[in-house]
Amino acid sequence: MMIYFQLFLAFFIPGILGYGGGPASIPLIENEVVKRYEWMTVQEFGEVLALGNSLPGPIATKMAGYIGFEMGGVLGSFVSVFATVAPSLILIILVGGILLKYKKSPKVKRLSLFVQPVIAILLGVMAWQFFSESYAGIGIWQTAIIVILSYLLIERWKIHPALIIAGALLYGGFFL
């Protein structure tokens, strides 16, 4: 039973202190896993980090799931992943509760008016970066075909975006 508590602490503490997301948490996770609890060597941790970087998704949760499974089985994996996301979850619940309580406040309404354009700009920058990387990697014609086809599938024929992403992955796997 003690291992589950240790797993929780080993991933909850980096989740609280790792401001900046998963990459900022990696040295903190390493400190807990390698130095504090000595569950792994530096070499083994490096291999887990390399494996985590090769898979899609947040690095901290992938590492937590793997290390938790190695130390405590399926329950250990669950505890570790939960501990990794718990700080963000708690903060979202608290901030969401505060925003819900004061949603009619003019200050909160003004805040959301200022946040919406920032989010739109960030999404636009991200889309431009994806387009630029695609253009550099596969060329203008394939990029243009994928963009136009994706637009038509989503907007005209109302195909779910997950299916389009899966199709793009299959296309990339077979033809690129």
Image (cartoon, rainbow, N blue to C red):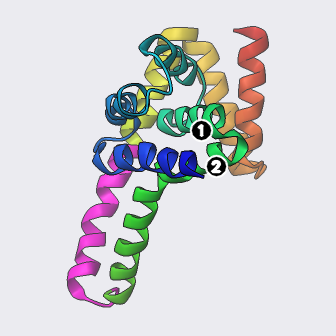
Where in the figure is residue 167, as x and y percent of width and height?
Answer: 77, 30
Q: Is residue 119 magenta?
A: yes
Q: Nearer the viewer, residue 99 or 133?
A: 99
User: From where the camera sits, is residue 7 visible?
Assistant: yes
Q: Residue at x 54, y 20 (%)?
A: 48
Callout 1 secondary element:
helix
Q: Is residue 77 above or below residue 85?
A: above
Decide which of tag 2 and tag 1 comes sooner along the chain: 1
When the figure is inspected, residue 62 is found, relative to residue 157, above or below; the finding is above
Q: As drawn, is 67 to the left or to the right of 18?
A: right
Mark 1 residue crowding within 10 angstroms, few (<14) / some (14–19) / many (20+)? many
What's the magenta bit mostly, secondary-structure-wise?
helix
- In the image as oriented, which residue stretches furthest toward the left? 107
Residue in the picture at 78% in, 48% down: 159
Quadrant position of residue 20: top left
> Residue beneath label 2, please?
78
